Amino acid sequence: MTTPQQDAVAPGPLPGAAAATHCPYCALQCAQTLTATPGERLPVAVAGREFPTNRGGLCQKGWTSAEVLRASDRITTPLIRTADGGFREAGWDDALDLVAGRVRDLQAESGDDAVAVFGGGGLTNEKAYALGKFARLALGTRLIDYNGRFCMSSAAAASNRALGMDRGLAFPLADLGGADAVLVLGSNMGVTMPPFVQHLAGVRERGGLVVLDPRETVTAKLARDGAGVHLAAVPGSDMVVLLALLHIVLAEGLQDDAYLADRVEGLDDVRRSVAQWWPERAEAATGVPADTLREVARLLAAASPSRGGRGAYILTGRGVEQMAQGTDCVNAAINLALALGLIGREGSGYGPVTGQGNGQGGREHGQKSDQLPGYRMITDPAARAHVASVWGVDPAVIPGPGVPAVQLLSSLGTADGPRALLVHGSNVVVSAPNATAVEERLRALDLLVVCDLVPSETAMLADVVLPVTQWAEEDGTMTNLEGRIIRRRAAVAAPGEARSELWILRELAARLGCGALFSDDAETMFDEMARASAGGKADYSGITYARLDAGEELFWPCPASAPGESAHPGTPRPFLESFPTPSGRARMIAVAHRGPADDVRPGMATYLVTGRVLQHYQSGAQTRRVKELAQAQPEAFVEMHPLLAERYGLTEGAVAFLATARGEAMARVRLTTDIRTDTVFMPFHWAGAGSANRLTNDVTDPTSSMPEFKVTAVEIRAAHRLRPASELEGAAR
Ligand SMILES: Nc1nc2c(c(=O)[nH]1)N[C@H]1C(S)=C(S)[C@@H](COP(=O)(O)OP(=O)(O)OC[C@H]3O[C@@H](n4cnc5c(=O)[nH]c(N)nc54)[C@H](O)[C@@H]3O)O[C@H]1N2
Ligand SMILES: Nc1nc2c(c(=O)[nH]1)N[C@H]1C(S)=C(S)[C@@H](COP(=O)(O)OP(=O)(O)OC[C@H]3O[C@@H](n4cnc5c(=O)[nH]c(N)nc54)[C@H](O)[C@@H]3O)O[C@H]1N2
Ligand code: SF4
Ligand SMILES: [Mo]
């Protein structure tokens, strides 16, 4: 076994050199150039780099990303919990021996599923692949899932059902520029991906941007100011909006009959399912005027190439997906797109706007409880046989499917549940729904191991914390929202004893008896992953670091070519010829409106919706540590309309007390007229008293297991005493 001292994980500072890489945060993966100071690890200068997605631009998080490299509380050595509840610094051998020993003991007592793994959509493809393989082979557990379940699972399930494949956007982002109409459903990309907005300039000019959101967000304002439309429907009523739009399209004969006959199945059932949603009835359920619904349906139809338009796109975001009916809602959006003949046609399309940096690749290579690499199903005997052959094992040793994230978290430390959890790239005590219950489950474990860069709130609960490298300190690949595979490149050495996750997984595997199945070299793991993905839906087998480093623009599927043939060019626009379904046609799926699980009722008379602000990323573990970002958004807040605030006796800056069936929270009031008068909005970036997820509902979608983050019934009161800001910040520092 190698000792850490012999193992340099990242190249040292590259004197005078600059690394061409991409932002650590969201799925837009804006291109950055990082320049290290010769001879020093820090500081690192960040500049935007020309790339088809960001065109040189970065948002405030991207510009300030290098601050996290020098976070004052960066973890630089393994930490082991002490008897008095604190941590002691430990050497790697100490920490890894402890973890492997405890894992073996717990599995000997309670079986292989005594140990579970929780991954993240921010991990590189190589790490996500290694983690799935590690769970199945080194731990032999079926229990692995990841935070992408909170993020992309509804859109993924809907795309798989309807289109036979989940490729995020099935077109390069720049294609949006030529469209006559873009319908944005529950995405606030003006805030969550600012450089994305450039691609909406053309459609805004043509008055074709339509945004569905209960708040008049930055994105909704782009629509309104561009003579487009903002639909501020009742939270959770989006499905009705979509059913009504399709009702109007079919009632007015605006559909693309030739395309439907040629490329789509299931229209008859869907036609029946939308019959009852005539516009006036939809108006009563959604608050969107019937005439506005007609206007939007006609605007979309006019943009369809079948009616001579330049093209139209429908995009979904978490606002319509993070619902207990999120999958059906996305299918309703896809049904509309299919009726208008938009999918699989150049210049038009449907796509979910992927969230995390590697939200796309993270869901393709085996972190999901039911998947093997290449987007293969773990229950499929042929898939198991192929992956087992690449791994050099008997297919019988690969465990069966596990359980999705919410179910996994709620089973931790219960009588039949796992006794240990390994967390890689998620801060679940802040970001999971019904977070107070999640924290209780984590505390009930015999062993919690967290790999992180910083002492996140979840890491602070761990028995063992293992320090990992971060983006600027490592090599690998990410797959962005377009299904484009890009290179992450190291610019600086890691601090102290921080190690790449690939190294940690290999070292743990070695202690569990199978170190030879793992490598800490990113390219080696990529090549193996590419082979494991060969023949799968997400086929990466034709992609190599050499091709990426030569600047080729590669989108999956990109299968390996036969010897002597030229290399496969990749697939920027799948579906142009046919859909990867048994019939080659797309499927319209009849769906019905059920509404949110939580009813707004007397005593809980207001909708709580949750989401994001520009300056903070997710649980805030990284961005709360960047001074400029923390100063701009220092504490938890709740946004509400002055009329609603008046009803509760609240004023700007007051502290509101919020309660739902799950728990309580407090947040400072921000008044705005940009929100419905029956709705309040809370971002989920803070821990402690201001944590939105103490309030959210952990009910899940029956198909995707996505939790209903977006709509909860809430009770609001003025807090009796003004709480100090520090309590609302709740940062574990
Ligand atoms: N600044 C920042 N950017 C990010 C992230 C971040 O944490 N911070 N995270 C990244 C990730 S992982 C993701 S998934 C994406 C998410 O990106 P988005 O989907 O754009 O983000 P959200 O703010 O979660 O939700 C979008 C909108 O949904 C609205 N909404 C709430 N309830 C409803 C409803 O019932 N119906 C409708 N139609 N809309 C509703 C909210 O008002 C909000 O404006 O952002 C990525 N980019
Ligand atoms: N109420 C509400 N809750 C939500 C949402 C919402 O809209 N509303 N959105 C949901 C969505 S879409 C998402 S994606 C989740 C995200 O929420 P989380 O899963 O908590 O995501 P992050 O905050 O990005 O946490 C990532 C953690 O991993 C660390 N990290 C970064 N890179 C690496 C790495 O390479 N290896 C390791 N081991 N660690 C790393 C970071 O420091 C951080 O502590 O939140 C969900 N929660
Ligand atoms: S939009 Fe996303 S990828 Fe681009 S700079 Fe901002 S956080 Fe980074
Ligand atoms: Mo996400």
Image: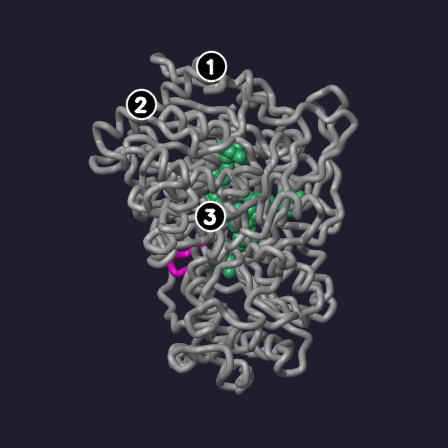
| Colour treatment of the image | one colour
Res 291 quadrant in image = bottom right
Of circles 2 and 3, which is in front?
A: 3
Tell me where residue 557 sits by quadrant.
bottom right
User: In the rendered structure, does residue 324 fall within the stretch colored magenta?
Assistant: yes
Asked which secondary structure carries label 2, the reply is helix
Q: Which mark is residue 270?
A: none
For residue 102, the mark is: 2
SS assignment for the magenta stretch, majority: loop
- Would you say residue 272 sits in the magenta stretch? no
- Asked whether residue 639 is in view, the answer is no
> Residue 450, image x and y in percent?
43, 29
Rendered location of residue 265, percent (x, y): 43, 78
> Which of the 4 quarters of the picture holds residue 97?
top left
Q: Quadrant of the N terminus?
A: top left
Name the residue located 61 percent from the left edge and 53 percent from the top edge: 484
- Real-space Cα separation, disc 1 to disc 3, in angstroms: 34 Å
Q: Reading the chain from its start, which is encountered first: label 2 or label 1?
A: 1
Residue holding disc 1: 91
Q: Position of residue 306 (x, y in %)?
A: 61, 82
Q: Which residue is mark 3?
A: 532
Query: How far apart are labels 2 and 3 at the CA level?
Result: 31 Å
Amino acid type of the residue tagged 3 in the rendering: Ala
Q: Residue at x 40, y 52 (%)?
A: 706
Q: Nearer the viewer, residue 301 or 667?
A: 301
Dot 1 alpha-carbon crowd within 10 angstroms: few under 14, some 14 to 19, many 20 or more: few
Image depth: mark 1 or mark 3 in front: 3
Which mark sits nearer the N-terminus, 1 or 3? 1
Q: Which residues are magenta?
A: 322-326
Specify the amino acid type for callout 2: Arg
* Residue 417 to residue 319: above or below: above
Amino acid under label 1?
Gly
